[in-house]
Image: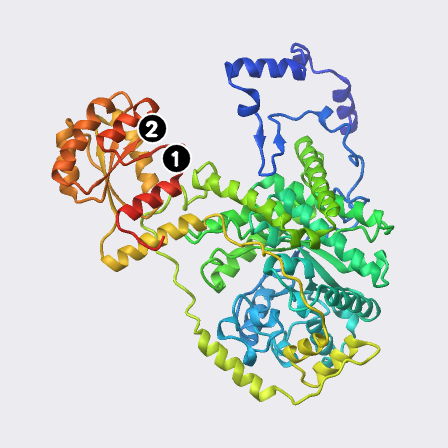
Amino acid sequence: MSDNRLKASSADRPDPLLDEFPAPGAEEWRAAAEAMLKGAPWEKVMITRTHDGLSLQPMYRRTDVTALPFQDTLPGEWPYLRGTRHPDRQARGWVVAQEINVPTPARLNVALRHDLAQGQTAVNLQLDEASRLGVDPDQADPHQVGRHGTSIASLADLMTALEGIPLEKTPVFVDAYSTAPAVTAMLAALCRARNQTLDVLQGNVGLDPLGELAAAGQLPLSLSRAFDEAAELIRWARRYAPQLEIITIHGYPWHNAGASAVQELGFVLAAAVETVRALLQRGLGIDEIAPRLRFALAVGAQFFPEVAKLRAARLLWAKVVTAFGGSAAAARARIHARTSTWNQTVFDPYVNMLRATTETFSGVVGGCDSLHVSPFDEPVRGADEFARRIARNVQLVLREETHADQVTDPAGGSWFVECLTEAMAAEAWALFQRVEAAGGLTEALEAGEPQRLVGETAAVRRQKIDTRQDVIIGTNMYANPDEKPLPGDGTDWNRIHAERIREMAERRPKLTLSLDDDDPVEALIDACAHGATLGQMFQVLRAEDGESIRVTPLPAERGAAGFERLRQGVAAHVRRTGRAVRVFLANMGPPAQHKARADFSTGFCQVAGFTVVSSPGFATPDEAADAAAGSGADIVVVCSTDDTYPELVPAFVRRLRERRAETIVVLAGYPKDQVAAHQAAGVDEFIHLRADALATLRRLAIRAGVTGI
């Protein structure tokens, strides 16, 4: 009998074992679950809520997705819910587009050539602060040169940075922002210097006026001029460089300010729509604009919401492009993903590798087109070769060992993921409509409404971190008391600045630039070829420009920053005084009586960098108090049970005050009906599961003499 006949007969025969069990309905399952809850509220125990307030059910069924739209579409079909690549085509996977944060073009070239040979597939050029502002190194403040990117000021610099890198095989992504016209001119001039046609250029030059405005609070040019330049670049690229994208709509400013996934999506969509409208007003068509635009979204810690976010982004963009009258091909969203900065930590930094791994998998499962994985030491220093290798290899393992690039939309069809995607898209669309009703993103930013909404979300997220409802491993829980901080990279920034000034003096030509030309982009390319610098081109482009608007910028602070400031302050106190903040655990009774709270108190205090000294269980309060006083500790934590505290605490505190009056007394636990009595007896603080750990530890540190926190 053939395999086909075997399969057919097996499929036709009902399973006699399953026939013995009735199929329960949703109501029966819920009734059984509620019985097990024994009166606990269903909404509180069984429903999980995201930062957006989206409700995640304990179980999903087929009936939950029957009414959802686009469930019968395939990958590569509008509205691209399941991805933009058709399954009939050979899987291409995503572009490995790692940022390389080094200060000079020569060092960048060495790192790029090495990393491209080790699996990276694109150049992801990050400009330093001076270059992003359109200022040459010899005109910039020293702290702006080489910081957070590479100093690129001329065609010569770009030729050095990209020497030996084939542009016809390697996409080049640049977050150029307002300097996009000058950077585009440099790339084009580089092609022509190599005797290559401009159609080899691929990648994106990263013009994003609204993202830059939201992040920085102002632009170095008027918004109108920024959109004028975007339109000119798109017209030029359509004619000469058909593979080159011009616009990147960044979600990072929103995400790194603490925004939720829905807020990042909603505000990014608002920025994209306002950009499209501005370009339509300048005579371009939607089918000319949309293919020149890429989204850059962060991927954070919550795995399934981040997967849903990328899927929802494609759905929403297809909806927008179609509403503008665009073709199905133009409605394909291109998404660059970057692992979260908000989630990274200074302390226990190797955990950043693990965070980046889950975030990378979110980006891959969500269907990103290009991806950067942040090195584990990014919050501390410019990544060294080891950190870059580990970050890059996270992508390569997913591609080469798990073959994730061969699977299209692996989460598709999951009832949970499909419901979450639809809910996230609906909420993001509602937020987008709210921004539209306020006159668009620019007017909303001027009024401060997006900043307020993101600030409220960030405050809630920080409160959950402070109270340890949300855990950051190694920072607000499970701290490593023996940790040695990562050393800096040893960069001599004054030397870097002086080196770049010397190079500029050798190269800077005496040019009189003018863009009175029918094709200003070609004029810039010609100026580049004759030695014009980025700063010179930027100044000419800004001539006779109007005033830039100002808004309240989005703050960029990692979620762990509060605990990090506390612990750094304690470490500075130790270096200054030569003495640690010491905590003595006054454990009462046998281990069964004190161990749970002693373990909790140890972990709680180590988060602040305090040195914790434990003790055996003492038989009497006087014995415990004498040991505590003799330890010389700044803080003493009493560890026992609620039932024993009324008898133990008054005697312990009285004896301790007689021996060492300045000692800070803390009680492990929070017996509500005893709090007033313990405070009257002299207890200064209570530490417990519901405590605001950051506020409590900060108060204890200040009382112990720590300053500057």
> Residue 273 at x, y = what percent?
76, 52
| Color scheme of the displayed model | rainbow
Q: Is residue 640 visible?
A: no
Residue 107 placement (x, y as % from top left): 53, 73
The residue where tag 1 is placed is 691
Task: Determine whether the residue tagged by mark 1 lies in a helix, strand or loop.
Answer: loop
Whole-percent x and y of residue 19? 68, 11
Q: Vertical placement of 450 versus 114: above or below?
A: above
Q: Position of residue 549 (x, y in %)?
A: 66, 62
Camera-nearest residue between 89 and 545: 545
In depth, the one of 406 and 334 nearer the eye is 334
Q: Is residue 590 left or right of 225 when viewed as pictured?
A: left
Name the amino acid, label 2: Tyr
Distance of label 1 from label 2 (alpha carbons): 9 Å
**Residue at position x 75%, y 16% from top?**
13
Q: Are marks 1 and 2 in contact (CB under 8 Å)?
A: yes
Q: Residue at x 57, y 41 (%)?
A: 302
Pointer 1 local density, CA inside 10 Å: few below 14, some 14–19, many at least 20: some
Query: What is the count of numbered marks?
Result: 2
Q: Earlier in the sequence, mark 1 or mark 2?
A: 2
Q: Which mark is residue 607?
A: none
Q: Is residue 632 visible?
A: yes
Residue positioned 31% across, 50% down in the render: 482
Answer few, some or many: residues within 10 Å of disc 2's Cα (few below 14, many 20 plus, some between 14 and 19). Answer: some
**Quadrant containing the N terminus in the rendered view:** top right
* 93 in relation to 117, above or below: above
Question: Helix, strand, or loop for circle 2?
Answer: loop
Q: Is residue 707 above or below residue 171?
A: above
Q: Residue under circle 2?
A: 670
The amino acid sitting under disc 1 is Ala
